[in-house]
Amino acid sequence: MDLIIIFSLVILGMFIGFISGLLGIGGGFIIVPVLIYLFDFIGIPTDISVKMAVGTSLFVIFLTSLAGAHKHSLNKNVIWKYSLILGLFGIFGSIVGVNIVVGYLSGNLHKMLFGIFLIFVSLHILYSNFKNKNNLSIIENRNISDIKCKCKDIGVVGFLTGFLSSVFGIGGGIIIVPFLNIFLKFPIKSAIGTSLGMMIIVSFVGLLGYMFSSCPFNQNIYNIGYVSLLTGLIISPTAMIFSKYGAKIAYKTKSESLRIVLSIILMIVGIKMIV
């Protein structure tokens, strides 16, 4: 890799880490399209580059989730019990997702599905944000000790999150955060913190699946399976550092603003992936 690419990856890591800590979403929706472009640029075939981008994204997400969850935990925004349940059920979803991606999805179809999925989530968040404004203000004032959920409901969402996480390399936060906030009435900051706790588990299992999948070795990116160690190790250090700054700002930011920022980012990236 030349210096321009390395510098770009460092900047990407800074941005991804900040977004991860701020919104609890891992950053895979940014990492994946950028890495697809990078791997295509250096001559890796599309069917391999998309899978490589997802696997490498999960590598970065795992490390940034550790840093972000630690910071949110210090601010008492992580409900570890629910993070664990979501993560354990997410493991099974991750296994199913990895097998489908590696065995059945073509590169172009993969990108199209990813874009449609992001746009759908973006519209849902915007709709909920403005339609239920009064209810959301009540939710944000809930005490974290008053939050009670059925394990069955949490388990189903955990499975779906793990599946979509491994398919799209997104860490699951863009599903879990709005679900916990809108449907299970978590305050947005608790939803973000709990999401990061879950992503530690789900992204790690998805990462292992991509690492142990058969893929030709490419000396330009030093990959194990569909995970580029070189790319991941360039992005991760700055991402881990800046995820702590994102978490710190999230603690001080209005909840409504956090939801709007999340939805706008998802919409832009989703449209870009389809176009």
Image (cartoon, helix red, strand yellow):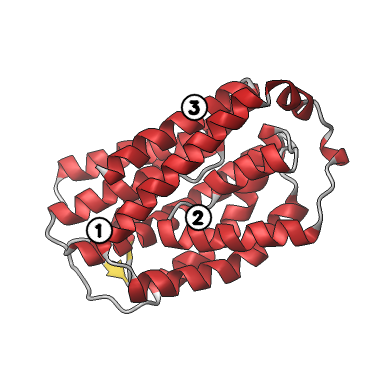
Q: Nearer the viewer, residue 19 or 223?
A: 19
- Residue 85, visible in the rendered structure: no
Q: Residue at x 20, y 61 (%)?
A: 46
Alpha-carbon distance for marks 1 and 2?
A: 26 Å
Residue highlighted by disc 1: 108
Where, quadrant-wise, is the C terminus in this rendering? top left
Lateral position of residue 252 relative to residue 107, left or right: right
Q: Is residue 248 above or below residue 205?
A: above
Q: Secondary structure at mark 3?
A: helix
Amino acid type for the residue under numbered disc 2: Phe
Q: Name the residue that disc number 2 marks.
A: 62
**For residue 168, which quarter of the picture?**
bottom left
Three-letter code, disc 3: Val
Q: Residues within 10 Å of mark 1 (few under 14, many from 20)?
A: some
**Residue 261 numbered tag:** 3
**Residue displayed at 31% across by 54% down:** 111
As helix, strand or loop, the secondary structure at mark 1 comes to helix
Cα–Cα gap, marks 2 and 3 = 23 Å
Question: What amino acid type is highlighted by mark number 1?
Answer: Asn
